Image (cartoon, helix red, strand yellow):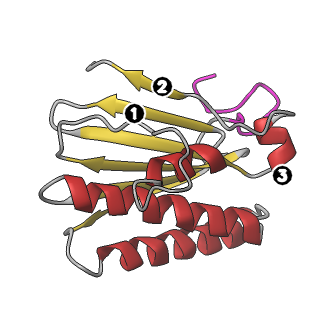
């Protein structure tokens, strides 16, 4: 399937329909800029490729972008790279930063102030991976284009976080 189709001429479910990447400087306005880029990407992709991007998907994508970029700006020096991809079944959000520490989602604690970002991303995503890179790390979250019942199943607990060793 070198042509990116699943044999019937249609794009395979995990094959990107469209992808875009952008760099952020890590300054005060970069989180808002990232959310705006995400919204514009989804609007344009929906129009150009005829995909239904619901308000739920748009809001969750902006939330995930906001949480991941916030963490990158807070815990890693230097620039932040964001990549957004759209497949037939999901929006993929990947955020790279130069920080060597791999984050872990903490157990829910309603009394804790702050520190809920990765916990939130894990809860709203159908998949979450943390990958060590030659420099820094890349965190990728997949937001399903379908309703939540198809994403989390009966338990509603969200995905497991996978961590890959350097490649």
Q: Quadrant of the C terminus?
A: top left
Q: From this view, report whether residue 130 is shown above or below residue 141.
A: above
Of residues 6 and 86, the one nearer the viewer is 86
**Can residue 80 be seen?**
no
Mark 1 lies on a secondary structure that is strand
Q: Tag on residue 130?
A: 1
Residue 13, quarter of the rendered image: top right
Q: From this view, report whether residue 84 is shown above or below residue 140.
A: below
Q: From this view, report whether residue 108 is shown above or below residue 71.
A: above
Q: According to the image, label 3 marks what residue?
A: 147
The stretch of residues the image draws in magenta is 1-13
Q: Which residue occupies 40% across, 79% down?
A: 32
Direction front: furthest residue? 111
Q: Quadrant of the N terminus?
A: top right
Confirm or deny contact between disc 1 and disc 2 (CB under 8 A).
yes
In percent of width and height, residue 44 lies at: 60, 73
Direction from residue 66 to residue 156 in the image, left or right: right
């Amino acid at each position: 399937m070198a042509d990116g189709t699943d044999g019937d001429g249609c794009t395979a479910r995990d094959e990107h329909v469209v992808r875009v990447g952008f760099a952020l400087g890590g300054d005060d306005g970069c989180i808002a800029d990232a959310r705006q880029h995400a919204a514009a990407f989804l609007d344009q992709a929906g129009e150009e490729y005829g995909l239904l991007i619901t308000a739920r998907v748009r809001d969750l994508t902006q939330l995930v972008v906001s949480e991941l970029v916030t963490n990158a700006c807070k815990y890693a020096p230097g620039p932040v790279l964001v990549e957004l991809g759209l497949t037939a079944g999901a929006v993929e959000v990947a955020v790279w930063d130069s920080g060597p520490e791999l984050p872990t989602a903490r157990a829910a604690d309603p009394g804790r102030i702050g520190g809920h970002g990765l916990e939130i991303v894990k809860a709203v995503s159908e998949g979450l991976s943390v990958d060590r890179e030659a420099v820094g790390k890349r965190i990728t979250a997949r937001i399903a284009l379908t309703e939540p019942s198809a994403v989390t199943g009966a338990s509603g607990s969200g995905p497991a976080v996978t961590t890959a060793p350097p490649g």
